[in-house]
Image (cartoon, rainbow, N blue to C red):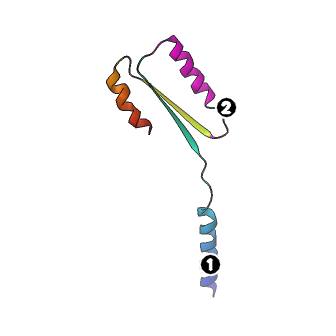
Amino acid sequence: MKKSCVYIILIIVLVLTSCSEREKVYKVGVSQCSGGLWRDKVNNEMLAAQHLYEQDVKVTIVCAFDNIVPCVSRRGDFL
């Protein structure tokens, strides 16, 4: 009898803890082909704004420095 009570309690605990909702994490990826003062300003604003939201937001910014091949190939890294 004691073993069955322990198993029932264990199953109840597992069911209750496994059904909890996970915290959402939003990922924003920016792949730029070139840099510049304007882009640096916008990038800094995006990085600063990621902390304004209640959910976790992670901004990743990469620059290809005027080389189109890495710029295009990095798009898949963000998916």
Determine the image quadrant of residue 13.
Answer: bottom right
Q: Quadrant of the C terminus?
A: top left
- Magenta residues, start to end: 35-55
Q: Quadrant of the N terminus?
A: bottom right
Disc 1 residue type?
Ile
Nearer the observer, 22 or 76: 76
- Name the mark on residue 52: 2
Disc 2 residue type?
Leu
Q: Which residue is mark 1?
A: 8
Query: Which mark is first along the chain, 1 or 2?
Result: 1
Determine the image quadrant of residue 33.
Answer: top left
Q: Position of residue 3 (x, y in %)?
A: 59, 83
Q: Position of residue 24 (x, y in %)?
A: 59, 46
Side of 68 relative to 30 (left or right): left
When the figure is inspected, residue 64 is found, relative to residue 37, above or below; the finding is below
How dense is the environment of label 1, judged by Cα within 10 Å: few (below 14), some, or many (20 and up)?
few
